[in-house]
Amino acid sequence: MATSTTTVPTENGWKYLQQLCKHWAHKLDVELDEQNHKAVVKFPEATASMQSDSSSLTVRIDTKDAAELETYQGVVASHLDRFAFREAPLPFDWKAA
């Protein structure tokens, strides 16, 4: 199992999290917890768990191998930057978990 996390500083984390979920819900299994500002997105080879608060958005990606991990880090980062175009590029500092 390969895992990485990043915490992106943004006051709009909840907004971006909702947008990502709505976007991906058309093709992927998405669970959105509005009360706790959390979400889980299940990709074919990875799972992205996200949580927002008033100052940041934290993302955790779990995959079976490191090559897939790097791919999904890019997928999540590019989609977040697309929705956060006023703030983009967001600073992603992925760390192995």
Image (cartoon, grey):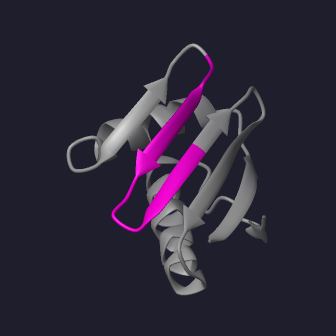
From which residue to which does the magenta span run?
Answer: 36-49
Q: Which of 82 and 44 is in front in this view?
A: 44
Q: Name the quarter where the N terminus is drawn.
A: bottom right
Q: Residue at x 75, y 51 (%)?
A: 7
Where 33 sits versus 11, above or below? above
Residue 12 percent across, percent down from the top left: 62, 33
Q: Seen in the image, is 91 located left or right of residue 74?
A: right
Residue 51 is at least partly visible in this image: yes
Q: Which residue is drawn at 49% across and 41% down?
A: 40
Q: Residue at x 52, y 58 (%)?
A: 81
Which quadrant holds residue 4? Answer: bottom right
Where 44 sits versus 54, above or below? below
Q: Seen in the image, is 74 located left or right of residue 44?
A: right
Q: Seen in the image, is 85 located left or right of residue 59?
A: left
Task: Judge whether residue 45 is colored magenta.
Answer: yes
Residue 21 percent across, percent down from the top left: 39, 39
Main secondary-structure element of the magenta-colored stretch:
strand
Residue 91 is at least partly visible in this image: no
Residue 61 percent across, percent down from the top left: 59, 60
Extreme residue in the left direction: 26
Extreme residue in the bottom direction: 67
